[in-house]
Image (spheres, grey):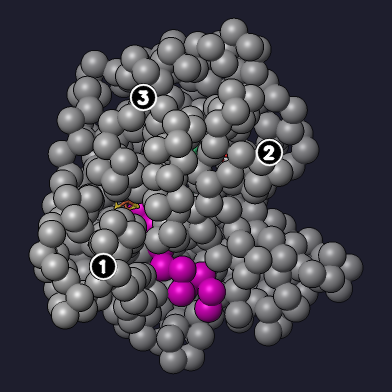
Amino acid sequence: MLDFSHEERCYHCGACAQKCPTGAIQMEMGNDGFLYPEIDEEKCIHCGACDRVCPHLNWEQKMPQLEDRTCFAAASTINEQYKSASGGVFYSLARYFLQQGGYVAGCVWDDTLTARHIVTNRLDEVERMRGSKYVWSDTTEVFREISDLLKRGEKVLFTGTPCQVAAANNYFGKKENLLTCGIFCHGNTSPQMFALWKKDMEAKHGKIENVIFRYHGLDGNDNAVQITFQSGKKVRQEINENRYLRGFFENYFGSQTCNDGNCQYKGDNLPGDILIGDFWGYKGDDIGKLTSAVICGDKGQDILKQICLADSLKLEQSLKKDIEAENPYLFKGRKPNCKRKEFITIANERGYLAAYKKLGTMSWYKALIYALKLKRIIKR
Ligand SMILES: Cc1cc2nc3c(=O)[nH]c(=O)nc-3n(C[C@H](O)[C@H](O)[C@H](O)COP(=O)(O)OP(=O)(O)OC[C@H]3O[C@@H](n4cnc5c(N)ncnc54)[C@H](O)[C@@H]3O)c2cc1C
Ligand code: SF4
Ligand code: SF4
């Protein structure tokens, strides 16, 4: 039976709870806002089902080594590429699956602006999966649903962070009708801290309807955060003006499992038939304003080539070293922040902005300029 007394070992995926045949495991929110399994020993029949799916215990994914996978620069040719975080490979892939009569699993904002994995065969819901939500996405209900679809012989594309893909691989086993797509990942953050940031913003400016962390503008030239309020007002901020994202990048409230030495999904143990990320510094032929980096094995490559033939994706073979040079987090985890506990305690007691004001690194004059700008935009 699982023994998870150490926070830094759990990926919060909920695979154990969904697999348990007696419902002995419940996912409960820890002080840091992440979900952890709680086991009711009286209900446990010691069948070992939870052990067999856990991505911490079953971390070796037996994927081809990075050396033996192929790399591409890629860009979607479907309109409105700029709704995606980078080259829109996810969207081309997902559309292909829907056209084949299949399903797509990925992360959306739900009605309460909580990041959550859903599985769907509807294009409007796939649209909601586009773009990076820089917060941990709740997968604690989706594995069971996907399992039923796979058993019925449906095709499913599962997308998520490498640890979520590992949980999916463990949960479903190798299946011909399942394709997994992992995103390059430098770590995740607490949904509770995101909710507290949102609460503080709403107290000042009214209800938030949507947050796009990487808004590119209609011409693809921007790289900003766009917050849409229920009143219809839209606020755009530079990425380092947004105090939630600054807290994320400074690692005040990331999962401890993402820290260097804890995340087991790095280097040669990167799961996913296809891996997609940003292609910073791409110097090859011009294939689109925003370009993704893609790493894949044979199964992924076959599908990408079919999508190319259908004209919804441009692919350009690329060098692994060019992708790796700009993406150090493919190999190592984040550095821990020694003020994490203090930040989370203050945020839980007095709110996100109070914690950031006390511990964050945005200087007072930048904060003042930012506050004035925000006030002006909202007034307008
Ligand atoms: C937490 C996080 C960390 C990342 N770190 C890096 C990095 O270090 N380097 C890098 O190159 N790229 C990173 N990315 C990935 C990158 O920003 C793009 O998502 C990726 O390049 C795919 O882009 P796209 O244009 O093809 O599709 P997009 O439309 O931008 O991506 C949508 C895909 O991302 C998935 N997704 C969105 N939010 C989440 C989430 N919270 N959890 C799980 N899946 C999610 C959706 O399910 C969908 O599959 C990160 C993304 C996230 C969410
Ligand atoms: S299966 Fe997932 S949620 Fe359960 S203990 Fe393992 S990592 Fe944590
Ligand atoms: S850094 Fe590792 S543990 Fe953290 S979300 Fe990414 S894959 Fe999962």
* Horizontal and vertical percent position of residue 244: 52, 67
Comparing labels 3 and 1, the label whose residue is closer to the camera? 1
> Residue 235: x and y, percent?
74, 62
In percent of the image, x 49 and y 53: which residue is there? 117
Which one is earlier in the sequence, the residue at label 3 or at label 1?
1
Q: Amino acid at mark 3?
A: Glu
Along the viewing direction, whichever of 195 and 336 lies nearer the viewer: 195
First-in-chain label (1 vs 2): 1
For the residue carrying disc 1, how many other residues have a C-alpha within 10 Å: few (<14), some (14-19), or many (20+)?
few
> Helix, strand, or loop for circle 2?
helix
Residue 22: give its label. Answer: 1
| Residue at x 58% of width, y 44% of height | 120
Please tell me whether mark 3 sits on a helix, a strand or a loop. loop
The span shown in magenta is 187-196
- Tell me the residue at 48%/30% (across/down): 155
Give whichever of 60, 31 is nearer the camera: 60
